[in-house]
Image (spheres, grey):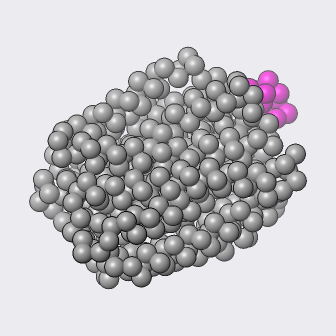
Amino acid sequence: MSADSRWLVFLTAITVVFDGLDNQLLGVVLPAVMKEWELPRSAFAPVVSLGYVGMMVGGALAGVAGDRFGRKQALLGSVAAFGVMTLATAMARDVTTLGTLRILAGVGLGGALPNAATLAAEFVAPAKRPMAVTATIVCVPVGGMLAGILGSQLLETTGWRALFVMCGLAPLITAAGLTRLLPESPGYLDRSTDRSAASAPLSSLFSVEYRRDTIALWFSFCSCLLAVYLGFSWLPTMLAGAGFAPGVASSGITAFNLGGVVGALAGGAVMSRIGSRAAMLTMNVGAIAGAVVLGLMTISVEAALAPIMIMLTITGGLINAIQTTMYVLATNVYPSGVRASGVGAATAVGRTGAILSGYAGPWALALRGSASYFALIAGAMVVCFVALASVKRHVTRSASRA
């Protein structure tokens, strides 16, 4: 990529860091909130799921808005929205208020990713898209890793409310700065001056040409996001329930996301060489195997911590790599006129997996603890494998090496 392209992709990626940070912050602080309010984890299942409902709505609305009014405006509006709501969450005093604020924050969180992915894809030439989009969306686990670090370092000293204040102010300041620094997508500007290249209707996602890929993408996003959010939302709680201290529980999600950063960048690089089908299906098999191994391990304070963290890093790396590179795949499937809408729709429908994780996580943990929890993750990735194998318009080896 040229220096200008790298700079623009970097600016876009900054917004995604805060998306990942604010998205995963609730999972990090949840054990502390449960203790302060003297409530069981099952009481927070609706809160977690309501946030994902907001993301579903935000992904669908912001994707259409990005195609109609510009990717930059939709992205920065989404960032400002989740910043305000995250800041307000610091004042929550009960589960109802917390759930209301999380659904509103979710609208912004869900709207940021499809427009960030589309911006990154259209800032570079088609042959550079796999790495540009991957380098942008990989910042979701970067933000999650920062959430885990902040939780492990500050949660016991500053309290969970202070974390929401910090993580709400940061995206607001960033959105204000990017108003001047970040340009609009070249693809959108080209269409705005060319009437023949206007936005395609949303119904075109189900035309004969795109129907199969649309359905396959929706299933792959849904199943993979179920696995991802089982980790994001319930991994610290699972480790805390096994007897680990809050700092160690937060470190678990840091390991899960650290693996995601490395895995996603490696996946983007491999995809650029061999195409997306072989790369993504291979990573998917590895993710299934990693979840199975974790399900067979004894996870308790009596067990050695290092092997647990190593396997969380590997498995989280593969799952996050698949989720991140799905955005590359989605931007490749759809043309510019419906690209943000197509990516937004896939992300929005995929949030049903995230919503399901809010209830499936506590159910699995109550059933057989970590064994059933990781078995559920493995099952979700099996569905993801089948869906990805069904996509016709994968990034081909010849296109990625063009």
Find residue 174 and report its image quarter. Answer: top left
Find residue 230 and report its image quarter. Answer: bottom left
Q: Is the magenta stretch mostly helix, strand or loop?
A: helix
Q: In what quadrant of the picture does the C terminus appear? A: top right
Asked if residue 152 is positioned above or below residue 248 in the image, the reply reads: above
Look at 49% across and 79% down and name the residue there.
292
Horizontal side, residue 30 vs residue 333: left or right: left
Horizontal side, residue 101 vs residue 374: left or right: left
The percent coordinates of residue 177 (x first, y second) are 48, 20
The percent coordinates of residue 343 (x first, y second) are 64, 49
Q: Nearer the viewer, residue 299 or 158?
A: 299
Horizontal side, residue 212 vs residue 302: left or right: right
Q: In what quadrant of the picture does the N terminus appear? A: top right
Asked if residue 244 is positioned above or below residue 135 in the image, the reply reads: below
Look at 83% across and 57% down and name the residue there.
396
Q: Nearer the viewer, residue 372 or 213?
A: 372
Question: Magenta residues?
Answer: 188-198
Look at 64% across and 28% down and name the residue there.
8
Asked if residue 302 is positioned above or below residue 240 in the image, the reply reads: below
Look at 72% across and 47% down and name the residue there.
130
The percent coordinates of residue 389 (x first, y second) are 72, 70
Residue 89 visible? The answer is no
- Residue placed furthest toward the top: 180
Residue 329 visible? The answer is yes
Asked if residue 21 is positioned above or below residue 41 in the image, the reply reads: above
The percent coordinates of residue 375 (x first, y second) are 45, 79
Q: Is 193 covered by the magenta stretch?
A: yes
How many marks on residues?
0
Q: Nearer the viewer, residue 300 or 106?
A: 300
Find residue 196 and report its image quarter. Answer: top right
Q: Is 154 covered by the magenta stretch?
A: no
